[in-house]
């Protein structure tokens, strides 16, 4: 049998963790032939709750689950890991603005970046889900100088899946008919789903709907989906966030025939400045990704993408000022 792949999950006792771990252990992340060893990181007060989650994992008797280690020391938990899903972060509390959140979470990601730098496997791939995901990934990347920069990604696959789901609903088609859809920019309300380069059954999606619908209904709906779920469910998206986290890492490791949305370090493509981690349409194969080149962007798309990139630059400047990068 093959050596287990070591997969780290931070915030493992949290809401997303509760959906994520069982899917990883069942083979959804790395396929039905790859055993996994889970490395679960939590803060000390949550280790007790994590113990309960581990009991449930045991009780599933997953054939692919080769082992579980838990702890509150990042360097120990990240030792030899091949994939790291950085989910744990501090949620925004009442009266906390985005700057406070950046500062509070920034410290988590400087430490985890440094710990990954010290102890992860040479082939490690890192995906940040914890918010503000793009900038947290930038902080971790900057604090891990020995890990190639392109190994740090942030999650915009949930926005991608939401965008796909809403378009499929509007046009009454299967999500499988939608091709080329991608999210650009930051994982916040400035994210931009480009329907001008999306096709549905071979036709350009933007031609199948009104422009007003795209601007006034579709984009706000995708952007506001997280809030709508909190309102309806009384808790933030967890299963869908876990599913998107799986989708992203699965495709990164195993490849995909589809264009997917990944937040990756910008190489200046499409005028998105270097020095930020932004969402782009990507192709993935053989364990690596490429930003899709040669896409024609209209003025509206370009404007939206630049506005979202400007948000990321703003966050980058803030964390720089805080001394986190
Ligand atoms: P929870 O608050 O339920 O769980 C977070 C867990 O992280 C807690 O158990 C906490 O103890 C742990 N944690 C905190 N600091 C830690 C540290 N330094 N090391 C290890 N663990 C630590 O939140 P949950 O609903 O699971 O969401 C987790 C993160 O995902 C949040 O930041 C949230 O904003 C973010 N999200 C990101 C999404 C995306 O698309 N990128 C969508 C869903 C979600 O909102």
Image (cartoon, grey):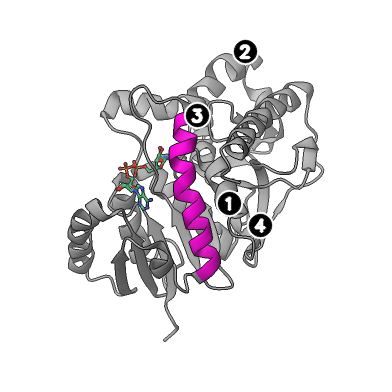
Q: Nearer the viewer, mark 3 or mark 4?
A: 3
**Is residue 102 located in the magenta-colored stretch of the structure?**
yes
Residue denoted by label 1: 153
Q: Earlier in the sequence, mark 1 or mark 2?
A: 1
Residue position marked by numbered label 4 in the rendering: 150
The one nearer the camera, 46 or 67, is 46
Circle count: 4
Q: CA distance from mark 1 to mark 2?
A: 32 Å
Q: Which mark is residue 99?
A: 3
**Residue at 78% from the left image edge and 26% from the top image edge:** 298
Q: Is mark 2 within 8 Å of ligand 1?
A: no
Disc 1/disc 4 C-alpha distance (Å) = 7 Å
Residue 202 visible? The answer is yes
Residue positioned 78% across, 43% down in the render? 268
Check disc 1 and report its element: helix, strand or loop.
strand
Residue 261 left/right relative to 74: right
Mark 4 or mark 2, which is nearer the start of the sequence? 4
Q: Residues within 10 Å of mark 3 (few under 14, many from 20)?
A: few
**Residue 183, position as x, y percentages in the image:** 61, 37
Magenta-colored span? 99-118
The N terminus sits in image quarter = bottom left
Q: Residue at x 46, y 46 (%)?
A: 107
Dividing the picture into quadrants, the one containing residue 25 is: bottom left
């Amino acid at each position: 049998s093959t050596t287990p792949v070591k997969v780290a999950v931070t915030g493992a006792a949290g809401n997303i963790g509760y959906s994520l771990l069982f899917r990883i252990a069942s083979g959804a992340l790395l396929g039905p032939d790859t055993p996994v060893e889970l490395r679960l990181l939590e803060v000390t007060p949550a280790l007790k709750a994590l113990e309960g989650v581990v009991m449930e994992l045991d009780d599933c008797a997953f054939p692919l689950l080769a082992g579980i280690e838990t702890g509150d020391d990042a360097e120990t938990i990240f030792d030899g890991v091949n994939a790291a899903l950085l989910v744990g972060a501090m949620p925004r509390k009442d009266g906390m603005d985005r700057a406070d959140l950046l500062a509070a979470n920034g410290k988590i990601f400087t430490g985890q970046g440094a710990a990954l730098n010290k102890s992860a496997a040479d082939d490690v791939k890192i995906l940040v889900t914890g918010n503000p995901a793009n900038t947290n990934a930038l902080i971790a990347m900057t604090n891990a100088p020995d890990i190639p920069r392109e190994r740090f990604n942030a999650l915009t696959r949930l926005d991608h899946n939401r965008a796909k789901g809403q378009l499929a609903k509007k046009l009454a088609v299967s999500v499988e008919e939608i091709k080329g859809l991608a999210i650009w920019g930051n994982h916040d309300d400035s994210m931009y789903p480009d329907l001008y380069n999306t096709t549905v059954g071979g036709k350009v999606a933007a031609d199948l709907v009104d422009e007003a619908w795209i601007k006034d209904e579709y984009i706000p709906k995708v952007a506001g989906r997280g809030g709508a779920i909190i309102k309806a469910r009384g808790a933030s998206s967890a299963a869908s966030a876990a599913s998107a986290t799986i989708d992203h890492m699965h495709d990164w490791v195993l490849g995909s025939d589809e264009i997917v949305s990944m937040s990756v370090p910008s190489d200046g493509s499409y005028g998105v400045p270097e020095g930020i981690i932004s969402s782009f349409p990507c192709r993935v194969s053989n364990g690596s990704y490429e930003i899709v080149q040669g896409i024609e962007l209209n003025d509206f798309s370009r404007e939206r993408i630049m506005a979202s990139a400007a948000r990321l630059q703003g966050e980058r400047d803030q964390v720089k000022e805080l001394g986190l990068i």
